[in-house]
Image (cartoon, rainbow, N blue to C red):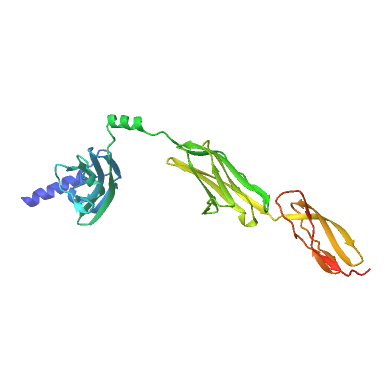
Amino acid sequence: MKNICFSLFNAILTSLQLPGKSKTLELKPEEKKFTSSLEKKKERPIFVTQLTPAAVTIGNSARFTVTISGFPKPNVQWFHNGKVIKTSSIYKIVEERDEYSLIITEVKKEYEGEYSCTASNKFGQTTCTTTLKVQVSDMPPAEKWVEEMFKIPGEPPHFTTQIIPVQCAEGCEAKFQYKVIGTPHPQVQWFKGNQEIKPSLNCCVVTDPDGTGFLIMIDAQQRDSGLYTCRASNPFGEATCSAELIVIRKSFSLTVKVIICFDLFEFWLLVSLCITVSMFYNVLYSYFYHRTPFFQKGAGVSGGSEGTYSHVPVRSYRHCPI
């Protein structure tokens, strides 16, 4: 009987055709519309979103949230400075699908530090780390008002007149002058290069109550050349200004008058020198009498400014040949 039914079924399938068509209908298996969770791709945990740093005032709450993918579903743990965090009245751990959160209900100073989240399954493990900074709460309004009432007003130093470059000859006076403002009144220091300048016999420092002041090199020499800096400072800041001092070697131009006085027994040589100071020309002459020098460059010259000087030497000769 079974064989007869099977043969009849095959005959029906073979002969079944659409009208006017030459094709035969065939039965096809139904396509699957859903995938079993067992057939989902297996993967190690991955942080889709990372932890971000937080800064919270004492007494407020803090929340760290990450999104993690992975299959099988990862096991998630939270750590504070390397120690495992357990759910408590302070720490709340929340899980919503692929989103995991750590909530600190009331932040205290000791909760500051490094926080990390570790996700793991049998295919791997990954960790994400961030920091929490705990800030001290603002003062109550009453305390702020008291502080403002007794706050000392002030402003940082500012040079209204800065020192300017100076050029002078050796032996002359060199002066740097400034004016500075600021509250409270700034303290002023002078420097040559990195070396602080202290008052001395050759260096005078003056500071006036109105904010003006100056530095004077009384007898400037070439070794005093360099960069000078004036620094003004108070509790609210500081300001500086700098300028260069150039000291030029001093030189002279000379006019020489020679007067010779003699008698039969004794010959005297009298030399009168009229010296005019010139700042930038060197004396290149020496004077001789019978190949004996009686005046050379710079001899007997003194003083620090332009003018006329006299110099009477020095040289006498007896038994002058006539």
Residue 162 visible in this rendered orientation of the protein: no
Q: Residue 321: x percent and y percent?
A: 92, 70
In which quadrant will I find the C terminus? bottom right
Indicate left or right for 240 with 6 as reference. right
Figure disc tally: 0
Indicate left or right for 199 with 267 as reference. left
Instruction: Report which quarter residue 121 is drawn in.
Output: bottom left
Determine the residue positioned at 64% across, 55% down.
221
Q: Residue 240: x percent and y percent?
A: 52, 45
Q: Which of 182 and 219 is in front in this view?
A: 219
Q: Nearer the viewer, residue 311 or 251?
A: 311
Q: Which of 9 and 297 is in front in this view?
A: 297
Q: Residue furthest right?
A: 322
Q: Nearer the viewer, residue 227 or 105?
A: 227
Q: Which residue lies furthest to the front in this view?
A: 265
Instruction: Report which quarter residue 20 is drawn in.
Output: top left
Q: Residue 305: x percent and y percent?
A: 72, 49
**Vertical side of 293 occupied by 203: above or below:** above
Residue 317 visible in this rendered orientation of the protein: yes
Q: Residue 178: x percent and y percent?
A: 57, 41
Determine the residue positioned at 12% across, 47% down.
8
**Vertical side of 266 occupied by 50: above or below:** above
